[in-house]
Image (cartoon, grey):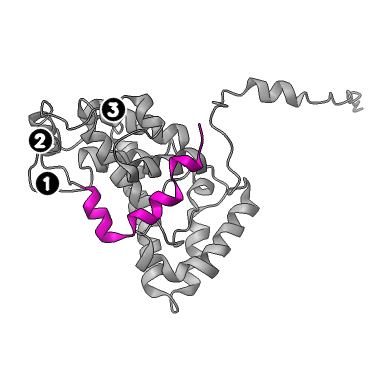
Amino acid sequence: MLTCRPISPLQPIDWDKCYASLEVDRTVKEVDWAKPGSKAGMNTLHLFISVRLKFFNSDRNNPNRQALSNLSPWFHFGQLSVQRAILEVQKYRSKYKESVDSFVEEAVVRRELADNYCYYNKNYDKVEGAYDWAKNTLKDHAKDKRTHLYSLEQLESGKTHDPLWNAAQLQMVHEGKMHGFLRMYWAKKILEWTSSPEEGLRFAIYLNDRFELDGRDPNGYVGCMWSICGIHDQGWAERAVFGKIRYMNYQGCKRKFDVAEFERRYHPKKFPA
């Protein structure tokens, strides 16, 4: 004969206690443009397809244009799968072939490269994880004179001599997502303005992981490693500090997009401390 134990009444959940137990840096404020959950992720995907996909191939490197998918936060937290996004985007390949192909290349090829690099390289977040040519060239130029040196606190508050860099940092701090093209410029300048490649990489990863909604992610680590240590890149013309690492500068950005427009949008006066 089977007997059943009486079910004890459910105890109410102390949500305040649950929230208090979270190890969260509450000095980093919530953003209002990205709502959590799969439904919000799908809404962002459909908005991307209907409004921005047509511009993705031509304008994704222009921080002043609304062309990116902005899906990385939902990908990072597992609230939207990359596969689902690709299946939906590919439905429009006959209409926007170049944009669809570019999106798939970023979402599959580059993401897989990042995942594999972090999985198989135990030094994925250290200079030691770079290729030999990159480690050698960074070592050869480690003692080169820097035109500027900034502390982590100065970088975090966006107080450098470069208004474009400051604007990109403010975008990341206040919106939780820096434009993808500027992430490259941002990280390379950190290499240029810190005392060593090791310090530069450490600062870049710290800031990325603290403020980016998609931080603590293989794409973020590889993005910093690409910018500072030449991962998935090749050697370029040798110069001070960078050695053979690919170089980016302010004038080069001005040739690609309206830098002044971006600087106005994220001017420090609009974001009081």
Circle 3 — which element? loop
Taking the spot 58% from the left edge, 53% from the top edge, the residue there is 41
- Taking 93 as reference, is 241 left or right? left
Circle 3 or circle 1, nearest the eye? 3
Secondary structure predominantly adopted by residues drawn in magenta: helix
Mark closest to the chain's N terminus, 3 or 2: 2
**What amino acid type is highlighted by mark number 3?**
Tyr
- Return the residue nearer the eye: 168 or 9: 168
Residue 216 x %, y %: 43, 35
- Taking 151 as reference, is 264 left or right? right
Q: Residues at badges 3 and 2 in contact (C-beta under 8 Å)?
A: no
Magenta-highlighted residues:
248-273
Residue under label 1, please give it.
Answer: 235
Q: Is residue 192 above or below residue 92?
A: above
Residue under label 3, please give it.
Answer: 150
- Return the residue nearer the eye: 41 or 236: 236
Q: Is residue 21 above or below residue 65?
A: above
- Taking 221 as reference, is 16 left or right? right
User: Marks 3 and 1, how far apart in space?
Assistant: 26 Å
**What amino acid type is highlighted by mark number 2?**
Thr
Taking the spot 42% from the left edge, 51% from the top edge, the residue there is 264
Residue under label 2, please give it.
Answer: 137
Q: Residues at badges 2 and 1 in contact (C-beta under 8 Å)?
A: yes
To which quarter of the image does residue 153 belong?
top left
User: Marks 2 and 1, how far apart in space?
Assistant: 9 Å
Examine the structure image and report whether residue 97 is included in the region drawn in magenta. Answer: no
Q: Is residue 120 above or below residue 55?
A: above
